[in-house]
Image (cartoon, rainbow, N blue to C red):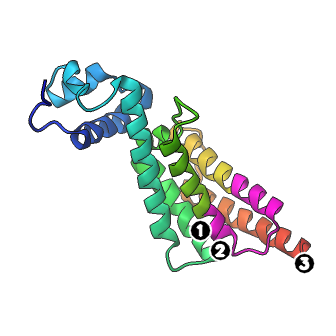
């Protein structure tokens, strides 16, 4: 049976992303997605391999979009400035696309080469920027883990309403990133 005219993987992913951002990642089902698109659920199977296939495509889309945002933020910058801009871009992406951001952590098959490659490319980007600091290999790995933990932790806590005190959230974020950078410079000094 040929795919329905006007229905494409792109239109399906766009609608699924909107649903995920509005309702949450776990609320995206083929039934709800089909209703949003005005089609029957079986029509979606011409484009995605069931819910796992849809989630995989959403993960790839999210990883690509996040990686692109980070690359744009890093271009022409190095060290502290690059880390600050990448961190802001990361948080902005997580805020603008909470469902798609959550999709970036989806793994149904740990051996999925395409997803693993996309994740590796993002790690490489962090590594390239952090290579501007005078860190040995072990310290570099710690720095990547630390930065990713700060960014994901802050984004996740904000998404679930974990910052209820009456203090500007953006100022908190900037303070955390500055503190992280001060720590990196301390590690640099200790390795000289």
Looking at the picture, how far across and down is residue 114, in whole percent?
A: 48, 45
Q: Earlier in the sequence, mark 3 or mark 1?
A: 1
Determine which residue is flagged by label 3.
Answer: 192
Residue 66 vertical position relative to residue 51 in the rendered view, above or below:
below
The crowding category of the residue bearing disc 1, from other C-alpha atoms within 10 Å (few below 14, some 14 to 19, many at least 20), is some
| Label 1 with label 2: CB-CB less than 8 Å | yes
Mark drawn on residue 84: 1
Q: Earlier in the sequence, mark 3 or mark 2?
A: 2
Q: Tell me the CA gap for discs 3 and 2.
A: 19 Å
Residue 69 in which image quadrant: bottom left
Could you say whether the residue bearing mark 2 is in a helix, strand or loop?
Answer: helix
The crowding category of the residue bearing disc 3, from other C-alpha atoms within 10 Å (few below 14, some 14 to 19, many at least 20), is few
Could you say whether the residue bearing mark 3 is in a helix, strand or loop?
Answer: loop
Determine which residue is flagged by label 2.
Answer: 80
Instruction: Tell me which residue sits at (64%, 52%) in the image.
Output: 148
Q: Tell me the CA gap for discs 1 and 2.
A: 6 Å
Q: Quadrant of the N terminus?
A: top left
Instruction: Tell me which residue sits at (27%, 19%) in the image.
Output: 31
């Amino acid at each position: 049976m040929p795919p329905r005219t006007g229905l494409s993987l792109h239109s399906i992913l766009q609608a699924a992303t909107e649903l995920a951002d509005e309702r949450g990642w776990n609320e995206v089902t083929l039934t709800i997605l089909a209703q949003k698109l005005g089609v029957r659920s079986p029509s979606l199977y011409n484009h995605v391999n069931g819910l796992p296939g849809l989630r995989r495509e959403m993960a790839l889309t999210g990883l690509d979009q996040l990686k692109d945002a980070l690359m744009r933020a890093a271009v022409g910058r190095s060290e502290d400035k690059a880390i600050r801009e990448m961190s802001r871009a990361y948080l902005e992406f997580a805020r603008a696309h909470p469902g798609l951001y959550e999709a970036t952590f989806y793994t149904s098959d740990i051996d999925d080469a395409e997803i693993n490659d996309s994740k590796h490319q993002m790690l490489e980007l962090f590594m390239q920027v952090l290579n501007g600091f005078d860190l040995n290999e072990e310290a570099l790995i710690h720095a990547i883990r630390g930065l990713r933990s700060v960014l994901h932790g802050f984004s996740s806590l904000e998404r679930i309403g974990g910052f209820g005190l009456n203090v500007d959230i953006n100022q908190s974020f900037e303070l955390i990133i500055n503190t992280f950078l001060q720590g990196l410079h301390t590690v640099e000094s200790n390795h000289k």
